[in-house]
Amino acid sequence: QVQLAESGGGLVQAGGSLRLTCAASGRTIDTYIMAWFRQAPGKEREFVAAKQRSDSATYYADSVKGRFTISRDDAKDTVYLQMNSLKPEDTAVYYCAADIRRGIYYSSAFYSHWGQGTQVTVSS
């Protein structure tokens, strides 16, 4: 069983940057697909980005493409989300997710493992 813990959230002005970190424990993540989702108040949890093994495909939601970058360091069992050019609409709780299977990577229902989330607030 893998446990996930996010960190790095905070308050930032529009146009600023943040880097989120997801630290995994319990099992190594090298065979897991790793993803980031976010949930704003009153809205459903939505896909942000996903990455399979370190040297394989990366996927992004259209709303963050060109601004956010997902990366992973499997040697450290850690996944990152670099967020640049932040906008007020990026404000949400950001969650790290993982699953060892292959499936619909952009669906929150697919993932078996979740962190507790970290709040990101972007002021205008």
Image (cartoon, rainbow, N blue to C red):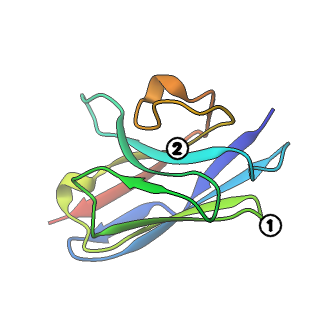
Q: Where on the picture, by quarter, is residue 15?
A: bottom left
Picture coordinates of residue 78 (x, y %)?
69, 61
**Residue at position x 27%, y 59% in the image:** 64
First along the sequence among labels 2 and 1: 1
User: Which residue occupies the extreme bottom position in the image?
Assistant: 16
Q: Which residue is mark 2?
A: 117
Kind of residue at badge 2: Gly
**Residue at position x 73%, y 50% in the image:** 24
Please tell me which residue lies in front, 23 or 54. 54
User: Which residue occupies the extreme left position in the image?
Assistant: 124
Q: In this rendering, which labeled residue sits more in front, label 2 or label 1?
A: 1
Q: Which residue is mark 1?
A: 75
Picture coordinates of residue 33 (x, y %)?
61, 45
**Residue at position x 14%, y 66% in the image:** 124
Q: Where on the picture, by quarter, is residue 107?
A: top left
Q: Secondary structure at mark 1?
A: loop
Kind of residue at badge 1: Ala
Please tell me which residue lies in front, 51 or 39. 51
Please tell me which residue lies in front, 83 or 121. 83
Picture coordinates of residue 52 (x, y %)?
58, 51
Q: Seen in the image, is 37 located left or right of residue 7?
A: left
Picture coordinates of residue 87 (x, y %)?
20, 63
Check disc 2: other Cα within 10 Å, few if <14, some if 14-19, many if 20+: many
- Marks counted in the figure total 2
Q: Seen in the image, is 29 located left or right of residue 59?
A: right
